[in-house]
Image (cartoon, rainbow, N blue to C red):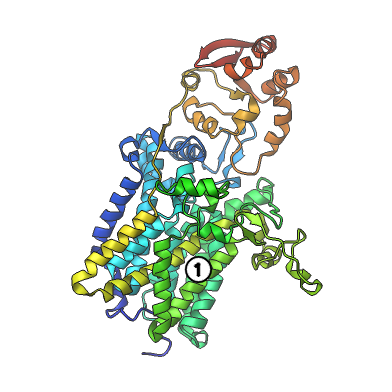
Amino acid sequence: MEPGQPRGEMSSQTSTPAQGLRIRRFVGPAVYFLGLAIAATWPLFLHMSNEIVGQYGDNLYFIWLIGWTKHALLDLHVSPLFTTMLNYPQGWYLASTELSPAQVLPALPFSAAGPVFGYNLVAIASFVLSGLIPCLWVTHRTQDVWAGVIAGTAFAFVPYRFSHFLVGHLNLMGTQWLVLYFMALSLVLDRREASVAWCVATAASLALVGLTSMYYLYMAVVLTVFFVLGYVLLVVPGSLRQRWLWRRLAGTFGLALPLVSVVVLPSLVAARAGTLPMRASGFSSPYSASPTDYLLPFTGHPLWGAWVGAHFERDYWIEASLYLGVVASALALVAVVVGVRKRGDRRATLHLLGMALVSFVLSLGLTLNWLSRPVSLHLPPWLTWLKSPDGQLLLPGALLYRYLPFYSSMRVWMRYGVFANLFVDVLAGSGAAWLIRRSGPKLRHFVAVFLLGLVILDFLPPRIRLTEVAARPVDRWIGQQQEEGGVAQLPFAEAAHSQAQIYYTLTRGRPYIGALYGSFPTSQYAEVRPVLERFPSAESIALLRDLGVRYVIVDAEWFDSRDELDDVHIALTRQRYRRTVALAGQYVYVLE
């Protein structure tokens, strides 16, 4: 072994590192992951252009974002970062919410069949890539494709990913770039990998992480410090004194710095302009994970999910579905036990285990919770520095919260859990490789298929329910009119929080005065909401005119249930708004 060569790679790796990533070895796994993604989301494949999984929610925002980006780039030839189609007339700087170009731009070539088709295609592709890239990584480590398929299946269909798929978080489904980043970074740190391609891949994949989710980018950067330090101190001790390591790190992150700077620039501009205020999360947050979140199966599991939901508090199941899986955890445990006993595997195994533990601890947030409830401890006076102002036990994340720039602006610490899932599943692949290898040539395929079946059973997806995505008759009618002007949907408060109203602008082709996506309302929204909530007061209708609203859509059923529909009609007609059409319970008043 040459000086500085990593001693922590799997002892089963008998060929050169490059052999593990020959593309033709992964044609079969790619077809498998595509078929499994279609099966897990069935019958979505039959309704790609007009239906989505689940109910209306954040999915409609991302469908709108795909449609708006296409319209801005191809028709208007302007930057899609700013739009006056929402929050009209002030407009909306989209960097103050979610952009996710790495998920939106791949959908554009397919949006000729509609933005819904593009959205669904990217969502399914995220399952395929989030399975295939871990398969590449584990196969490279173990030289066993079956082990890679098992690890990739465990990660691609982990409950964290499926929960965000069900509610339409297209950005958080882009986990494939997280895997590619840490895989490429591990190869940068491997001296046997002489190609500069891995330095480029690491820098590019980190930029792709940022183009997917700012949460993922920030968390990946934090974990990179632990990953690199753990690798050079544990896997290749003494490498800090060697020039090759410093050259690679300098080249990799020197290339990554300008790429990431371009990625985060829109968010920094939004923060400086005051459209992206810093969030103070406080020490106690419902979005801090509990250790039990990693143990409780997914509430959507068709066999035992209902029982879990009935017996445990899962109010925050979307973010808290961090279940590692019994099978994946058992395989990871096998990898740890076997790896620690083998000198050649010990260091790499402990490194991955350490990264899983670091991710787990950071996902717990600032203070300890158990079963989603804060844990308060009675400590002696000399240990009071370990308690938060609320009397809860402080965790290591509290140090980052206090001293790391921008760390306090995050609120969903649970999202570190996807990294814990990743490192556990990579270990699980190593454990599967050991069991398959021990079973002998006659039984290896049987054992591999058996383990794969157990993983699939553990992560069975819920029954998929589809919802048709379509504009209302009233939106199509407005889209056919000649008069320009803004649109208001009333009652304002209920409509402004609806992602459907954002989507409807694609059909109306008219700017909308509402829209509140994410946690940060615009200054215009904060100013007009108190007035428009008093509709149909004279002041509210005067404000509609000042905002440039020509089309007022009134939800007749909502106002009629409160015996206010006649008052609405009288107030609007007094201000020269004329009732023009009534379609599916929506009255349209047009300013004369």
Badge count? 1
Residue at 49% over, 78% down: 231
Residue that protrudes farthest toward the left in the picture: 442
Q: Is residue 537 above or below residue 8?
A: above
| Element under disc 1 | helix
Q: Is residue 527 above or below residue 210?
A: above
The C terminus, quarter of image: top right
User: What type is the residue that disc 1 sits on?
Assistant: Ala
Q: Determine crowd level at label 1: few under 14, some 14-19, many 20+ residues with C-alpha closer than 10 A.
A: many
Q: Is residue 576 above or below residue 383?
A: above
Quarter of the view holding residue 150: bottom left
Foreground residue, 238 or 267?
Answer: 238
Quarter of the view holding residue 548: top right
- Residue 252 x, y percent position in the rendering: 47, 71
Residue at 81% over, 72% down: 381
- Residue 520 x, y percent position in the rendering: 65, 43
Q: Is residue 578 above or below residue 38?
A: above
Apparent side of residue 27 relative to residue 479 in the rendered image (left or right): left
Apparent side of residue 485 relative to residue 324 in the rendered image (left or right): right
Apparent side of residue 363 relative to residue 334 in the rendered image (left or right): right
The residue beneath circle 1 is: 356
The N terminus, quarter of image: bottom left
Residue 379 appears anywhere in the view? yes
- Residue 279 x, y percent position in the rendering: 68, 51
